[in-house]
Image (cartoon, rainbow, N blue to C red):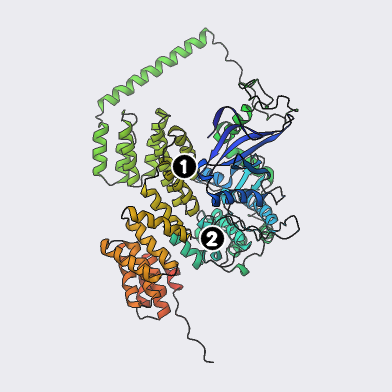
Amino acid sequence: METTLGQPTWFGHYRLTSRIATGGMAEVYVGRHITADGKFGPMVAVKRLLPHLIKDQAIVRMFLNEARITAQIEHPNVVRIVDLGHEAGEPYIAMELLDGHTFADLREKVADEGKRVPVGITLHILSEACRGLDAAHRAVDEQGQPLRLVHRDFTPDNIHVGFTGDVKVIDFGVAKTAMWGAGTEPGTLKGKFFYMSPEMILAKPVDHRADVFAAGVMLYEQLCGRRPFTGNSVDEVVMRIAQGNPRAPHELDPAVPPGLETVCLQAIEHDPDKRYQSLQELIDAIARVGGEAEVASKQAVGDYVSRVFPKHKDSKRDTLRRARELDPSYPGPPSPYAGSLPAHAPEQLDAPEAPVVGEAPAPPAARAGPSSALKVGAVAFAVVALAAGVLALVKLRPTLSPAEALTQAQASKDPKARTALLEDLVEQQATPEQLDAAGKLLLEVKAGQGALKLAEAWRTQDPKSARAWLLEARAAVALRKGKRVEAALEQARDLAKGESEPYVVLAELKESLGEPQQAVEAWSSALARKPDEMRFKARIGYWQSQNGQLDLAQATLTEVLKKQYDPVSAAELGFVKFRKGDPGGAAKLLKELIKKDPGSMAAHYYLGAVLYQQRDVKGARAEYLEADRLAPADPRPLTALCEMEAQQNAPELAETKKSLEARFEDGKQIAARCTVAPPPEAP
């Protein structure tokens, strides 16, 4: 969403006109570099940290690390860094201004219509992105030393596809090189869990082949319409990646070309030595498949993206156009800001860049003659008559008041019944409080589509209602429409300045996507706006733990528990102590928690792991079984039990395997991995 700045704003030597994006960590503006003698360069995207993060040196290092790494790579398939530095103590990155969408945007828009991006288009996008990242893998520093870079977040969100078919890798924020490190704490997991390689999950040495794995995951998604490793929680996804053995793509879609399936499965091999050893090898393998897997041309990709995002219906495209026109240097009609530049700004400008060719203005409407007027009048009369008839029918049909509809909806647990009762509340003049309550009732029974329809009607009627935009964002979270969430949240943030709720919804989105570091950042943004809210701090501590930031997690969770009792935080703190090498402290804390809250599945599950390490196999088995009883839909306790029994060659192993196979979709694969270790060979 575009936000104009009222008039051009100066940020060092950059004249900013519009904010075009806001995330959990930074904002992006359209700007132009103006020199002291009045010369100006092309328009660029200026990325600035959110104000409350500027004092966090770890985040600043990670932020600037992105630019330092990217600046070392000269390749047409990698976004170009123009400038980086500090202005009045605030870090910034200036990069080339891209006109298009991310691969994630493209896939999501097509998925909304029940389709997948055509194979040829996908192969071109992936191949070109792999070319850029392969160049990054081979990059050297100023002394000619290999950087040995690993992107570690090679995902659809970080591949940009232009309307001309240009493909560029973006966002090296969590990349690691042998020279500079990763910009975040050592030993932490980085990037999005769904695309992480097994060696990243298992804390083994990571090299560029982790990015080959991520490319293979993206290819698998496009071939099958689903990810190779899924689950109901971060832990479950991580476990399945660590174990490997994805289903063959043809089992999910028989139309997958066999040659392409072979390429895909080799790219996501569990053992890095069995994968393609470079992205160039993967590109060559894709090119050799041919036939049904013919790689599309750059022109075909540009045409396809332009069809999916038509010029006059694409808000992002329109945002960029408006941002250009707001720049006083833009060679178009007189700018509304003419003469309003600050006194220190240069007055003489070099010849500007060529304008973006737009559509010709629509001609003035022709005056209707008498016959046209008669026709219009007749049509208008017919419309009025029809409307009157409809209103008469509506009056004959008994309707519930908003309060009655809410009462009946609350009494029903059926998603369809609640949707039927609540989706038309806007037309019934419901109050904002009633609409808010209706949205919560729909989301409670996972009626995301009904909640989205209600939100759309509400914000159409009242576009200045932050609560309407927040409901749309929450509904989009439930439907896994990430870009829709972010667009709605930008509106909500602008309408509810200083409020924490938009950041809460953003954090919930990042949690659902399995992005721990981004979840921490979003919860931190919420906490900055509501510093006494312990719920926010508890979520920060939980995700710091899930992200492997054990020292930070211990400090955060301890602070939460000093101020209020929270079973989730207590269980997670026990797990942190266990991983930090304090099983005794972990066991004590988890046992105390179970006395207070015997229904805590996490406490029993974590205690099972602690007791097993302490060689209390009987106690560990009892805890795993209790955790399984409390959460029968979660495969983790039974999986842990199966693995423990296999290591112990326990007589109960066969029964546990049967239970896994009977209860879970991938139970046979899990059970197959619970194998008894062979006895050591005699010397």
Q: Position of residue 400 (x, y in %)?
A: 25, 32
Quadrant in which the C terminus appears: bottom right
Rendering coords of residue 193 (x, y %): 50, 57
**Left or right for 578, reference 351:** left
Residue receiving disc 1: 485
Name which quarter of the figure residue 382 lies in.
top left
In this view of the protein, which residue sits in the foreground, 207 or 180?
Answer: 180
Q: Nearer the viewer, mark 2 or mark 1?
A: 1
Q: Tell me the residue at 26%/36% (across/down).
A: 405
Q: Secondary structure at mark 1?
A: helix
Q: Amino acid at mark 1?
A: Val
Q: Residue furthest front?
A: 88
In this orientation, does residue 27 appear?
Answer: yes
Q: CA distance from mark 2 to mark 1?
A: 30 Å
Q: Residues within 10 Å of mark 1 (few under 14, many from 20)?
A: many
Callout 2 secondary element: helix
Indicate whether 643 appears above or below 224. Answer: below
Instruction: Judge whether 108 appears above or below 39 on screen.
Output: below
Residue shown at 69% from the left, 29% from the top:
355
Q: What is the three-letter code of the residue carrying label 2?
A: Pro
Is any part of residue 631 visible from this angle? no
Q: Which of the numbered marks, if any, corresponds to residue 316?
A: none
The quarter holding residue 27 reads: top right
Pointer 2 local density, CA inside 10 Å: few below 14, some 14–19, many at least 20:
many
Please name whichever residue, 58 or 641, is drawn nearer the observer in this view of the structure.
58
| Viewer-side residue, 324 vs 555 | 555
Residue 524 location, x and y as percent? 45, 47
**Where is residue 20 shown, x and y percent of the image?**
56, 36
Q: Is there CB contact under 8 Å for labels 2 and 1? A: no
The residue that mark 2 highlights is 249
Vertical position of residue 65 compared to residue 273: above or below: above
